[in-house]
């Protein structure tokens, strides 16, 4: 039986979820959760996953406090109540003395 999990949606992607900051769904693995999320919210999948179905380079995914890269990747098994957080990488700013 699939686990009920919550996926936290970052602000830049909430336009794809009608403004929702969280989506609750049923899934056995992180990969299944992200695929289901993409099917439920058109346009969101390609912003999270690349053409090979892997997380994009500048998108970090956490299950609880653990980075998906330190777990079993998209095959990471989910438990009821798990929270998946999608966190876009942040870059920019200026060096001291610039600007």
Image (cartoon, grey):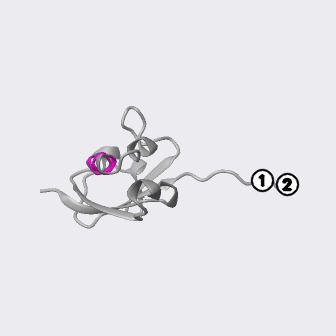
Please report the bounds of the magenta region as a residue range: 32-38
On the image, the x and y values in percent for residue 64 come to 37, 63
View extreme (right): residue = 97
Question: Between 2 and 47, which is closer to the camera in this rendering?
Answer: 47
In the picture, the quarter occupied by the N terminus is bottom left
Q: How many marks?
A: 2
On the image, the x and y values in percent for residue 83 come to 34, 63
Instruction: Give me the disc on residue 94.
Output: 1
Q: Is residue 21 above or below residue 53?
A: below
Q: Residues within 10 Å of mark 1 (few under 14, many from 20)?
A: few
- Which residue is rendered at x = 73% and y = 54% of the image? 93
Q: Where on the picture, by quarter, is residue 78?
A: bottom left
- Which residue is rendered at x = 86% and y = 52% of the image? 98
Q: Where on the picture, by quarter, is residue 20?
A: bottom left
Q: Is residue 85 left or right of residue 99?
A: left
- Which residue is rendered at x = 39% and y = 57% of the image? 17
View extreme (top): residue = 52
Is residue 35 magenta-colored? yes
Is residue 46 magenta-colored? no
Tag 1 or tag 2, which sits nearer the N-term? 1
């Amino acid at each position: 039986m699939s686990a009920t999990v919550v996926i936290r949606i970052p602000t830049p992607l909430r336009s794809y979820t009608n403004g929702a900051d969280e989506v609750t769904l049923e899934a056995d693995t992180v990969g299944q959760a992200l695929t289901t999320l993409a099917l439920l919210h058109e346009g969101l999948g390609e912003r999270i996953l690349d053409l090979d179905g892997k997380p994009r380079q500048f998108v970090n995914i956490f299950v609880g406090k653990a980075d998906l890269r330190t777990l079993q990747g998209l095959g990471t098994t989910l438990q009821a109540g798990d929270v998946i957080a999608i966190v876009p990488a942040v870059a920019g700013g200026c060096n001291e003395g610039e600007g």
